[in-house]
Image: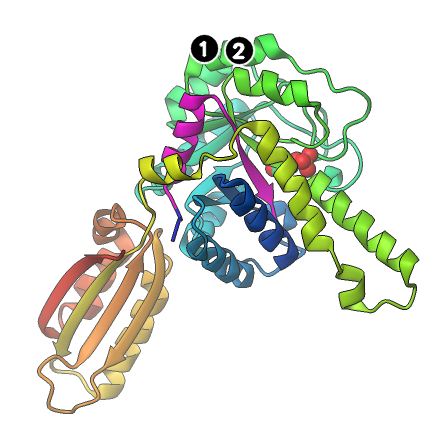
Amino acid sequence: MSLVNMGDMLNHAYKHGYAIGAFDLVSLDFLEGIISAAERCEAPVILSLAESHFAYFDFELIMSAVVAAARRTDVPVAIHLDHGECLKSAVTGINLGCNGVMIDSSNQALTENINLTRSVVDMAHSCGIPVEGELGYVPGVEGEDAERHPGEIAYTTVSEAKLYVEQTGVDFLAVSIGTVHGRMQGEPKLDYLRLQEINDAINIPLVIHGGTGLSDDQYQQLINRGVSKINYYTSLADVAGLRIRENTQNNPLNGYTGLADGVQETISTEVERCINLWGSALRAKEVVAQCEAWSPVEHLIIYNVKGITGDETIAMINEGKTILSSIPGVLEIITGHSIQDDDSYRYTWLIRFCHRAVIESYRNHHLHVAFANTLFRPVAGERISIDYQTH
Ligand code: 13P
């Protein structure tokens, strides 16, 4: 399995002068098309899920497939929450399996943007997860996805970028230097000098949103100035739409599978073009070797209860599951009881953390402390507790 630490992944790209594609996906055709392109190119890739697209799919359901795809492939993968809107969204993304999150409060005043970003960074870092912030504003102009980013472009300034990074502790910065979400109108004019100055001032991987529609040379100029992650969606949606229209023309009686025929392949071809352009092809092996493998830690408790009935025990367990599953970094909670009546340890909790960092942040989290001190420890008798790093 090749889920890897996204911070390590982007720092590798930043250090070695290439960019990794963060491709937004809205269906299994996108997921499979992106992964197969990364496999053909032996490239690291970021599977990106934008909160602005949650109307198109069930985030929880699709995340099961995304995590399974990331585990099954040999190429290095990170799973990213794109355009997260608030702290709660970031926690949800992490608890469903994202190992990188973006907080997008770029439409707010600088102080509010800093405060919200800082709260997401504190939470995510306590789970071992890096954060992308955005400063300046990348609007949409026309076509697919544009309407989800209303308003005017606001360029990132160097001084604000420096302050924002210092005060928030973000790991990557999305900058606004002339790109737009959606289809480009005319020849986009990118402010390379501004980008260079931001890169010199903050020295962390930079991110470009609105990746669709730039020329080969423009991508290269961005990468030369610190851009290590390029967000890309509209062009994938457009090639998929084109294929569906062709399928309709070829056979107006096509049903669903006939209309969707070849969509995955056409998305994959476009992803492959980007990967080759952005310099991430043939990097998979070195990235896997140099990045922390991203695998969960399991917090296992086996225990007995004393002084309460079986029903009261089940009520305590159910309440615990509800409370504890909302703590950042908790991927899953499995509980059970022993099948043999005479076992000396009759009950179990298996709590799956996204990363080893969560062992401490979970232990100190106020919800865990309150549950453990009031509902669990007073009735828990003999117990064994172990944290396992899974492989
Ligand atoms: P495009 O849709 O313009 O490629 O931009 C994608 C994006 O920035 C997602 O965050």
Point out residue 285 in the picture as x, y percentages from the top left corner. Answer: 39, 39
Residue at position x 21%, y 69% in the image: 375
Contact, mark 1 vs mark 2 (Cβ under 8 Å)? yes
Query: Which mark, by number, is residue 200?
Result: 1
Helix or strand or loop: what does disc 2 sit on?
helix
Quarter holding the C terminus is bottom left
Q: Is residue 244 above or below residue 155?
A: below
Total tally of numbered discs in the picture: 2
Q: Which of the labelled discs sits on residue 320, or is there none?
A: none
* Residue 390 % position (x, y): 26, 57
Which amino acid is tagged 2?
Gln
- Residue 18 included in the magenta stretch of the image: yes
Residue 196, label in figure:
2
Q: Give the range drawn in magenta.
A: 4-27
Indicate whether residue 267 is drawn in magenta: no
Q: Disc 1 versus disc 2: distance between alpha carbons?
A: 6 Å
Question: What residue is at 32 percent from the left and 67 percent from the top?
Answer: 333
* Label 1 beta carbon less than 8 Å to ligand 1: no
Task: State ligand 1's quadrant.
Answer: top right
Disc 1 is placed on an element classified as helix
Q: Residue at x 33, y 74 (%)?
A: 318
**Toward which corner of the image does residue 387 lie, by quadrant?**
bottom left
Report the amino acid beneath label 1: Asp
Compared to 255, does 19 lie above or below? above
Judge left or right: residue 123 versus residue 201: left
Using the rendered image of the protein, determine whether residue 41 is visible from the camera's viewpoint. Answer: yes
Q: In this view, does 354 lie to the left or right of 359?
A: right
Between residue 12 and residue 85, name the one nearer to us: 12
